[in-house]
Amino acid sequence: MSKHYSVLPTLKRESILSLLKRGERLDGRALDEFRSIKIETGVIGKAEGSALVRLGDTKVVAGVKVEIGKPFPDTPDKGVQIVNAELVPLAAPFFEPGPPGEEDIELARVIDRGLRSAEMIKLDELAIVPGEKVWIVYVDLYSLDHYGNLIDASGLAAVSAILTAQIKRWEVKDGEVNLLEETMPLPVTSVPVFVTIAKIGDNLIVDPTYEEELVMDARITFAINENGEVCGIQKGGSGGFTPSEIKEALSIALEAAEKIRPLLPTRN
Amino acid sequence: MKGEIKLLREDGTRLDGRRLDEVRPFKIEAGVLKNADGSAYIELGNNKIMVAVYGPREVHPKHLALPDRAMLRCRYSMATFSVEERKSPAPSRREIELSKVIREALEPAIFVEEYPRTAIDVFIQVLEADGGTRTASITAASVALADAGIPMRDLVAAIAIGKIEGKLAVDLNGLEDQYGGGDMPIAMMPRLGLITLLQADGVFSPEEVVQGIEMAEKAIKMLYEEQRNALRKKYLEIKEEVLGSE
């Protein structure tokens, strides 16, 4: 557990709860309101696709790199998607250097499943020589400043980097792969939007800040595709939700996803 | 690979003969290990899982101890021979994530504030895996915690809902999980009506999510009965032993 213990959360919880009773939050947002979202793409020249996302004061950068490699034996005619996330120590006083911990791994796997379930990257168009050579797409996420809700910020960064990624066209001659100068967009189908809802007492709030995360009972993340379908769920934190709270959280998530979607970069 | 084989027969039953809302045969036993403070064993279909609980006990290293509550630690580990192709013994990323979500599924049930500065360790060993190991692990782990005498608000029972050929189904086995179209594991404290684990991959409509939770509740109630029976059975055996020796 990377969360350092402090008495602050206990004290803060009281003030946050009494505000929530009146339908208010510390930063003045409505319970179902996201912080401001700013997405910059193409920020890393060396990456095939990249995005810097600011969700309030939370900052995450995502980079897409591709390389030619071997497919998985059970999917010989498909490209490979690998998502990695690192909560680097520069982003928060309690993130420590070293191998990825369970929070880094959970974050990466939640984003990975959301992208995979939505079938965002068209992996079947990324086979070069089926069974031999396919494109491996790495989506790497670095948190730069952790002010809460790294999952949603990372999700936005990942999909924005993928949407704007350009890979080299290729041709195969006598089993040899030639990469051409000309590029093409990374083939993409559906785009998931991640929405996290925190439960504090009996209140459900969207896009929790760092302070709200410290005092929350539990959180739940929904990945939503453009058809308003759920393509990923992850509950976290050491509390629980009633079935009706899940229903309510889901409808908050569906609405929020719809508002966020127009902010995503257009495909190039 | 998805959807390449038919998972439903003409008559609407599944390949192993179950109805869509039917749980595989299962058994739960409490107090199966001698060293552990509490333990449990579960079989669910071909899944075989052993859980041991140690604690509350001293935390090492000491600075990790929490001043206001017990620290719950959980390790979900699959035996190398539990799956078709030998698994490397090093913890995989999947095992690390599952250890976390299982811990967070169990913690709401435990009065951790009763044991400040201690650790409660939950060790889960999957001996054989065939779909739904995380949910079966949670069901067994909460019995092991109760068997260790740790005060709890409720037991936690869990089951996975999945999609096969576009239909919701309870308790997917390994084959159905591999070729089916989605997986939604759910854990609940049945008496308190609280969901403590909810994950999903694959695509579900919002209505299916709600319906899936309702389906899971039914299966979970049944598992809950067996959890209680397992605990009751162990204590009846102890009672007989004690009375028999008098």
Image: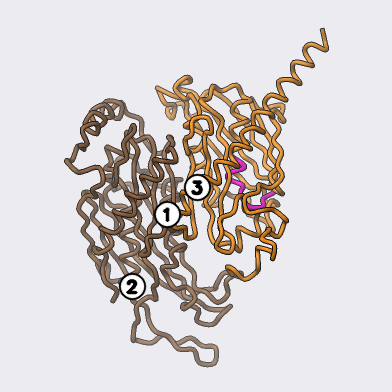
In terms of depth relative to the viewer, which is nearer, A213 or A21?
A21
Assess disc 2: are there few (<14), some (14-19) or many (≥20) residues with their C-alpha within 10 Å of its C-alpha.
many
Q: Which mark is residue B206?
A: 1
Residue on which disc 3 sits: B97
Q: Is residue A265 above or below residue B230?
A: below
Residue on which disc 2 sits: A165
Q: Secondary structure at mark 1?
A: helix
Q: Chain of mark 3?
A: B
Q: Is residue B22 above or below residue A161?
A: above
Mark 3 on the same chain as mark 2: no
Q: Residue at x 72, y 30 (%)?
A: B32
Q: Are marks 3 and 2 in contact (CB under 8 Å)?
A: no
Q: Is residue A197 above or below residue A153?
A: above
In terms of depth relative to the viewer, which is nearer, B229 or A117?
B229
Q: Secondary structure at mark 2?
A: loop
Residue B132 lies in magenta, yes or no? Answer: yes
Q: Is residue A234 above or below residue A131?
A: above
Task: Find residue A31 and report its image quarter.
Answer: top left
Q: CA distance from mark 3 to mark 2?
A: 29 Å
